[in-house]
Amino acid sequence: QVQLVESGGGLVQPGGSLRLSCAESGSIFSTIAMAWYRRTPGKQRELVASISSIGNTNYADSVKGRFTISRDGAKNTVYLQMNSLKPEDTAVYYCNARIRVDRGPPNDYWGQGTQVTVSS
C-alpha cells in the first residue's frame, strides 16, 4: 500500500517562507511524477508545481519565481520551498504522486493535506 505523508505547513507572515515535505512509502515499482496542489474554500483544486522522474518542473503562473519544487530520490521525498509568501497562498496543500506499484498502468495517490496560512 502506498502512503504519502506531508509535513511543514503552518502560519507565516506575508513575505515569509515555508518548506513543505512529502515522503512516499510502500510497495512502489516506479514514480512517474510528483506534484503539489492546493485548495481554498470555494475554489477548485489548483496545480501549484510538478516534477517528473527526470527532473522536469512545471509551475503555476501565480507561484513562478517564488516557489521551487525539488525531489530527493534517495529519500523518496518531494519538497516545495515557498518564499515571498502572500495571503492569497493560504490554502490546504496536497501532495500528489503518479506511481506504478507493478508493471501495469500508474495510479494517482494523495497525501492528507497540510494547511498553509499566510497572515499578519
Image (cartoon, helix red, strand yellow):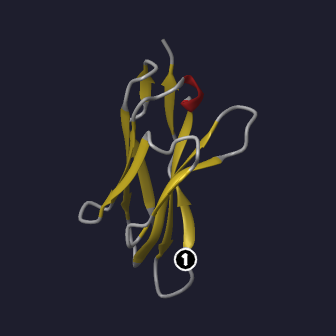
Going by the picture, which residue comes out furthest to the top? 120
- Nearest the viewer among 57 and 102 is 57
Picture residue at 44% right of the left edge, 55% below the top = 4
69, 32: nearer the viewer: 69
Q: Secondary structure at mark 1?
A: loop
Pointer 1 residue: 106
Q: Residue furthest front?
A: 65
Q: Is residue 81 left or right of residue 110?
A: left
Q: Residue at x 38, y 73 (%)?
A: 54
Residue 70, position as x, y percentages in the image: 35, 55
Which image quadrant for residue 13? Answer: top left
Q: Quadrant of residue 15?
A: top left
User: Residue placed at 51% from the left, 25% from the top?
Assistant: 117
Residue in the picture at 40% in, 77% down: 30
Q: Is residue 23 above or below residue 84?
A: below
User: What is the quadrant of the N terminus in the image?
Assistant: bottom left
